[in-house]
Image (tube, rainbow, N blue to C red):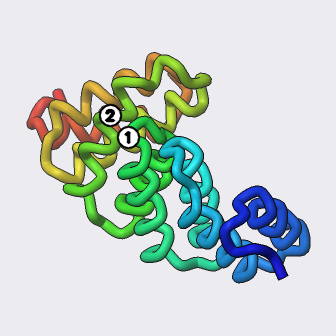
Amino acid sequence: DADPCHVPTLEALAALARAEANWPLAARYLDSAQENIELPRRRARVLTELGIVQSEQLQQADAAIASFERALVADGDADDARLRLARLYVAAGSFDQAEPLTERLVKVTSQRDRDARLEIELLHAQVELALHKPMNALHCFQAARRIDVRNTAATRGVAEACYQLGDWV
């Protein structure tokens, strides 16, 4: 048995559980580890890992949302948690909650690779369109097209935003 307060041991045990695809055990170790971490960035990183296990392996969207939200409370610059949380909110149709997250991601998108920038622009555009903000959505879809002119989702999005604006001529 591991010392429930020894974070490096808990993280190592979580890594072993992940390697063995024992996702409930991995989640338990990560949760125990994050409770004993004082440093905000490190705590946010472990909470993000926990949220990934919860969402991708255990299909526990509500628990994952809580983990990603706690990661952002611990470290407001935890953009990986922010992106994953925004995806979950969009999947749940919670566009009002996703909007501030995607807005922030768009502002810091220049630091990411091309594919990540494209995903963020499209995600924000989707949110803006769902919130009936077609002009904002149009700008995001156009930015996505500047990243990848062949992206069909961006092209369709431009058309949809123009249609909502009544500018389809």
Query: At x 50% / y 31%, what residue is drawn?
Result: 118
Q: Quadrant of the C terminus?
A: top left
Does label 1 or label 2 sit earlier along the sequence? Answer: 1
Q: Is residue 99 visible?
A: yes
User: In which quadrant of the rendered image does the N terminus lie?
Assistant: bottom right
Residue denoted by label 1 = 76
Amino acid found under the numbered disc labelled 2: Arg
Residue density around tag 1, few if under 14, some if 14–19, many if 20 or more, within 10 Å? some
* 135 sits left or right of 108 in the view: left
Residue sitting at 77 percent across and 56 percent down?
A: 8
Q: Quadrant of residue 30?
A: bottom right
Q: Is residue 164 above or below residue 167?
A: below
Badge 2 crowding class, 10 Å Cα cut-off, few under 14, some 14 to 19, many 20 or more, is: some
Where residue 25 sits, quadrant-wise, is: bottom right
Q: Residue at x 40, y 44 (%)?
A: 123
For residue 104, which numbered disc appears in the image? 2
Q: Residue 64's mark?
A: none
Q: Gap in Å between the C-alphas at discs 1 and 2?
A: 11 Å
User: Relative to the observer, which residue lies in front, 8 or 135?
Assistant: 8
